[in-house]
Image: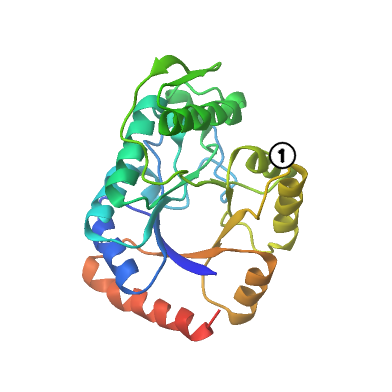
Amino acid sequence: MDFGLVLFTSDRGITPAAAATLAETNGFSSFYVPEHTHIPVKREAAHPTTGDSSLPDDRYMRTLDPWVALATAAAVTSRIRLATAVALPVEHDPITLAKTLATLDHLSGGRVTLGVGFGWNTDELADHHVPAGRRRTVLREYLEAMNALWTQEEAEYRGEFVDFGPSWAWPKPAQSHIPVLVGAGATEKTCAWIARYADGWITTPRDFNLDEPVKRLQDAWAAQGREGAPTIVALDYRPDPEKLAHWKELGVTEVLYGFPDKPEEEIPGYIAHLAGKLAALEL
């Protein structure tokens, strides 16, 4: 089981490049950042944790662009995976986003993992002309279209929301396949969606008992006839040996820990202490 760090980026405090450097030098396997293009002031969408339109953290309206953030991280690291938890592909043009991700993967030597969400903030999606009731369909088409551009010499895609004829697009990603993980509640519908269109699951901050959702995902994976096992990335708050050992037994492949967007000089001790605690677990 691997361990990674997730920085809820903002325009204050430690930069993604500095944070990623600390992650790599302290032995973490990955570095994740989130995405919100903007937050409409007037909204009807309820946040999953507050239950209403209020936000639990002002960083939702201050997040950095994830691809620029990860590009700066790629330039100062050589080993860790560069990922999103989560990005919102449907808020972009799929052809240009495919180019951005392929370029990032190419320049980083094949270190990109694409964590995606359906988008809880439907007001935000509406400004990008994404129908709330079609979020999953739009995301599926975007992923399929981007994969075509990444893997086919002459790519084309015909869908309801994405439609383009035979096209050339380079660079191709350095990886033969950019892993796609879905961050969402593990309902039966979502698990079936992951088993059909993605490579794994990122838990939500509300997922405390993983036994049932992991089993649900594994059953959906088997029912779809997928080989191997899904990647499962779990968000955690503090290392607990018994819990982590149980998660490993369940099939969790990576555990993520967050840290604050405080000034750079306040972060190294925090990261080193966390790394030391995890190393002592010998999982």
- Residue 93 visible in the current orientation: no
Q: Name the residue rendered at 49%, 47% in the picture.
A: 179
Quadrant in which the N terminus appears: bottom right
Quadrant in which the C terminus appears: bottom right
Picture layout, residue 5 above or below residue 87: below
Q: Which residue is mark 1?
A: 189
Q: Name the residue rendered at 63%, 76% in the picture.
A: 245
In which quarter of the view is residue 24 placed? bottom left
Picture layout, residue 115 above or below residue 280: above
Picture layout, residue 276 above or below residue 128: below
Along the horizontal axis of the image, is 106 left or right of 60?
Answer: left
Q: Amino acid at mark 1?
A: Lys
In the displayed orientation, state which residue is furthest to the bottom: 280
Q: Residues within 10 Å of mark 1 (few under 14, many from 20)?
A: few
Q: Who is closer to the viewer here, 93 or 185?
A: 93
Picture layout, residue 19 above or below residue 96: below
How many numbered callouts?
Answer: 1
Q: Name the residue rendered at 56%, 40% in the picture.
A: 46
Percent of width and height locating residue 78: 28, 61
In which quarter of the view is residue 213 placed? bottom right
Percent of width and height locating residue 79: 33, 63
- Residue 199 visible in the current orientation: yes
Q: Name the residue rendered at 59%, 57% in the picture.
A: 232
Its colouring scheme is rainbow
